[in-house]
Image (cartoon, rainbow, N blue to C red):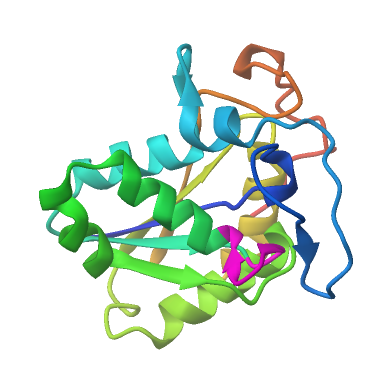
Amino acid sequence: MGHVIFCNGYSLAEDPGVGPVKKRNLELKSTSYGDWNKVCIGDGAGLGRIGRTLQLARLFPADVVIIWSTGATWINWASEAIMSFNTALSMMPYPEHDWLRNISILEEKSTNTFTSLENAREIIRHAEWGQDLMMLHLVSSANNMPRVMRDACKIFGNVHNIILSGVPAETSYGGKTPADVVIYELGEPPVV
């Protein structure tokens, strides 16, 4: 069984250490929380989205692909996907850089979580390994996971060779902790 890890992007405007951030349509994007490092890398209390993605990838080193997503916000030439991937490289010892490069795919066309999952489905569908039975591990913040799983069920619900797995990071955005998450805060769970 193959494993695909989908690392959900996070607005680059939330990184107070970077320059002007633009949306795909070139509008400037402002910050709400200023917590990109906590959400994506992690903090002393836990792993963020990127840290959780790397942890998960190490569990399946022989049979894993990572999709770094999205293209919703940009800093100059770098999308959220590129920034997440480059940050992941900086978090790993040098000998593992080639391994990470070889298993990584950048998804930069999307503008939100739903479209990034749609693009991930197309990436999987067109890949030579896309017909095999696989686990699709969706990594995001705990307080974003209900929405990610809802959208993934809509997009992958009729794809019979994919088993969905929600893997929340240990950090969340907006000052929330995983314990603050209300599982069905977005309404009823999807029916698959």
Quarter holding the C terminus? bottom right
Q: Is residue 75 left or right of residue 68?
A: right
Residue 84 place in picture, x, y as percent: 49, 52
Q: Residue 190: horizontal and vertical position, in percent?
A: 72, 48
Judge left or right: residue 104 versus residue 16: left
Circle count: 0
Q: Residue at x 47, y 60 (%)?
A: 68
Residue 28, position as x, y percentages in the image: 87, 60
* Residue at 10% over, 51% down: 95
The image quadrant where one finds the N terminus is: bottom left
Q: Which residues are magenta?
A: 71-80
Q: Is residue 26 shown left or right of residue 173?
A: right
Residue at 86% from the left image edge and 47% from the top image edge: 30
Residue 133 covered by magenta stretch:
no
Answer above or below: position of 119 versus 4: below
Whether residue 140 is visible here, answered yes or no, is yes
The residue at the point 64 percent across, 12 percent down is: 179
Whether residue 1 appears in this view of the structure is no
